[in-house]
Image (tube, rainbow, N blue to C red):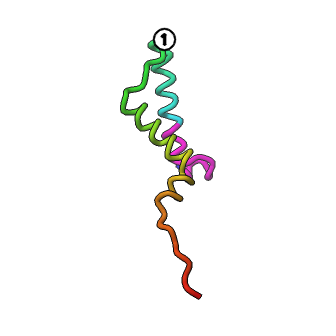
Amino acid sequence: VLRATAGRLDLGTLAAAAVAAAGAAEVGAAGKLPLPPWFNLGWWAFRTFTTMEATAIAKASAPEREAAPA
């Protein structure tokens, strides 16, 4: 894909665009926006929390370092 597009498009971007297009086609065909399954909502909630609180989580889980004697 990179070679075919001279480095302007990679496989990850192409896959994301395909999934977005398929989702848009489904919404267009059904005429309504379905609610995501509970496990997706749970994962997104967890991922959002850990992303937004990454600094606090890292500080809480890092062992405290004691000053070495001089």
**Which of these two is toward me, 56 or 11?**
56
Task: Kindly report the secondary structure that dominates the magenta region of the rendered protein.
Answer: loop
Instruction: Give the magenta range.
Output: 2-16
Please identify the quarter of the rendering in which residue 41 is found. Answer: top left
Please identify the quarter of the rendering in which residue 52 is found. Answer: top right
> Which amino acid does the dot numbered 1 rest on?
Gly
Quarter of the rendering occupied by the C terminus? bottom right
Q: Is residue 1 above or below residue 48?
A: below
- Residue 7: x, y in percent? 61, 52
Q: Where is mark 1, residue-wise?
A: 31
Q: How many marks?
A: 1
Residue at image position (42%, 38%) is 43
**Which of these two is toward me, 15 or 2?**
15
* Neighbour tally class for label 1: few under 14, some 14-19, many 20 plus, Cα within 10 Å: few
Q: Is residue 60 above or below residue 41?
A: below
**Which of these two is toward me, 4 or 10?**
10
Does the magenta portion include 9? yes
Residue at image position (54%, 82%) is 68
Question: Residue farthest to the top?
Answer: 31
Does the magenta portion include 69? no
- Residue 59: x, y in percent? 53, 59
Q: Is residue 47 above or below residue 66?
A: above
Q: Which structural element holds mark 1? A: loop
**Which of these two is toward me, 46 or 4?**
46
- Residue 35: x, y in percent? 43, 21
- Residue 33: x, y in percent? 48, 17
Question: Residue farthest to the bottom?
Answer: 70
Question: Residue farthest to the front?
Answer: 69
